[in-house]
Image (cartoon, rainbow, N blue to C red):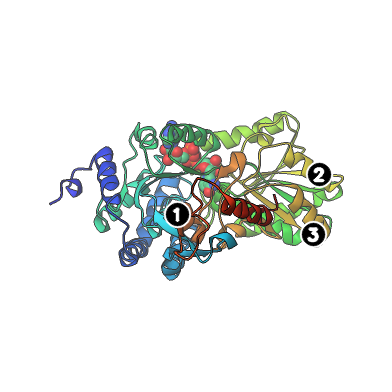
Amino acid sequence: MDALTDAAPPAIDAVFRRQVALSRGGPPSAAERLDRLNRLRALVRDNEKAFAAAISADFGHRSTVETVMAETLFVQGEIRHATGHLKRWMAPRKVATQLQFMPGKNRLLPQPLGVVGIIAPWNYPLQLTLAPAVSAIAAGNRVMIKPSELVPQFAQLMRETVAAKFDVAELMVTGIEDGVARSFAELPFDHLLFTGSTRVGRIVAAAAGRNLTPVTLELGGKSPVIVDRSADLDQVAARVAYGKLLNAGQTCIAPDYAFVPQASVESFADKLLAAMRRFYGANPDNADYTSIINDRHYVRIEAMVADAMAKGARALQIAAPHVPEWKGRRKFPPTIILGATPQMTVMQEEIFGPVIPVLGYAEPIEAIAHINAHDRPLALYWFGEDAAARDEVLARTVSGGVTVNDCLFHFTQGNQPMGGVGASGTGAYHGEWGFNTMSKLKPVFYRSPLNRFADLYPPYGGKMKRMTSLMRLLSGG
Ligand code: NAD
């Protein structure tokens, strides 16, 4: 038996070295990639219930429906998309040739980068480990995954199921012991995809930079909602409530805060609260509502609300007073904050929980100015029917992505790239974008024997002069 697939967990460095050595031996064929993707598909399909149970145990409670929709089915969809398009993605791509080089031809040749490292957060632990792995495998890379230490049961299950279906030289899941994350980020990968907080993203980017390892950083931040005067507030309330409370707000692209016309603040907050109650009832301790991941995050969210109230804000909650058992199960009641100011932590930090400040604006430009005065958001949500107002916001703000008239759904578009900008991230993946991110798209020029343009060797004479005139004409110089 291979030493690296023996019962004892293989050393991360040894696996890395072996993956590098094998990756230099040539690219895997389409058939090999399809085989790996199909094994991954079977792994997710066969263990769907076990994954949902492990993730729920790690959270305290995670809605099974949400795990299936946002994790297992999402990854299955990415696999199906990749397997369906793989041959086309792998094929050399035609690129136009300038007149002076004709009849030579240009091609862009997709090649695997080699070994891809993936560092994942806890909030969608299956999706955010395996969706990047799908891109990396489709592109022909060998892959190492470092899951989050906050989801130990999930991480253990993933490690076991991957080890049962893959040679460690193809796909490997590391342990989550202290120190693994740091040393993992220091490995000289051919590409490193990190999903997590902006704070840790800076550390990971610095570690990768020392190796000149290119990174895709999928980070967080405060994603705003802008509700235009032309919007139907009942519809907006339901859509924002859903986007906010999926996974109890522990979603990187969850709407973080909402700007509504000043005159509508109170009525919108009432409609939002009513929608939250309609979805989850007056008792958050139900099967559809997910727990906060751990006590530290529960206390962090509680402190944000307390800080806002101490500084003069008002909180609307689906139920009051809180029942102690909810806290025991880390079910944080959905909360709307009115009267938030820049001095409150709720307006300074990514909330990452079921709390949403609702702010008023006199003119839409105030919302635009607020957004532009802060870090580029990962997502932006605009609601309304006034196309001119919508286009103004789209043109004047820069964000990782936008959904118009709903929340979250730009993320689920299989043909669109997912990625932030500035402090919310760099690079992108999903579908063909992920394939391209994890590939070297190598330009190759095939010189034609019929073309004499390149034969302009010294000593330069009249022929060179004529060619220079032609080039001047072609380049407009
Ligand atoms: P985190 O940054 O604390 O941790 C993410 C990963 O980084 C974990 O695996 C952790 O072990 C690892 N890590 C921690 N310190 C490290 C170090 N020094 N070197 C290398 N790795 C290290 O984030 P989190 O709390 O797990 O996740 C929440 C954050 O992730 C939020 O900010 C959220 O917005 C963001 N997020 C972004 C996306 C996206 O697609 N853009 C998706 C989900 C979550």
Q: Secondary structure at mark 3?
A: loop
Q: Going by the image, does 410 lie left or right of 262? A: left
Q: Secondary structure at mark 2?
A: strand
Q: Upstream in the sequence, badge 2 or badge 3?
A: 3
Q: Going by the image, does 469 lie left or right of 147? A: right
- Amino acid type at image mark 1: Lys
- Residue lying farthest to the left in this orientation: 1
Q: Nearer the viewer, mark 2 or mark 1?
A: 1
- Amino acid type at image mark 3: Ala
How many residues crowd around disc 3 within 10 Å: few (fewer than 14), some, or many (20 or more)?
some
Q: Is residue 89 visible?
A: yes
Q: Nearer the viewer, mark 3 or mark 1?
A: 1
Q: Quadrant of residue 119?
A: top left
Label annotation for residue 231: 3
The residue at 55%/62% (across/down) is: 97
Label annotation for residue 442: 1
Image spot of residue 387 (x, y percent): 81, 61
For the residue pair 278 and 197, the one nearer the viewer reads as 197
Label annotation for residue 360: 2
Q: CA distance from mark 2 to mark 3?
A: 15 Å
How many residues crowd around disc 2 within 10 Å: few (fewer than 14), some, or many (20 or more)?
many
Q: Is mark 3 within 8 Å of ligand 1?
A: no
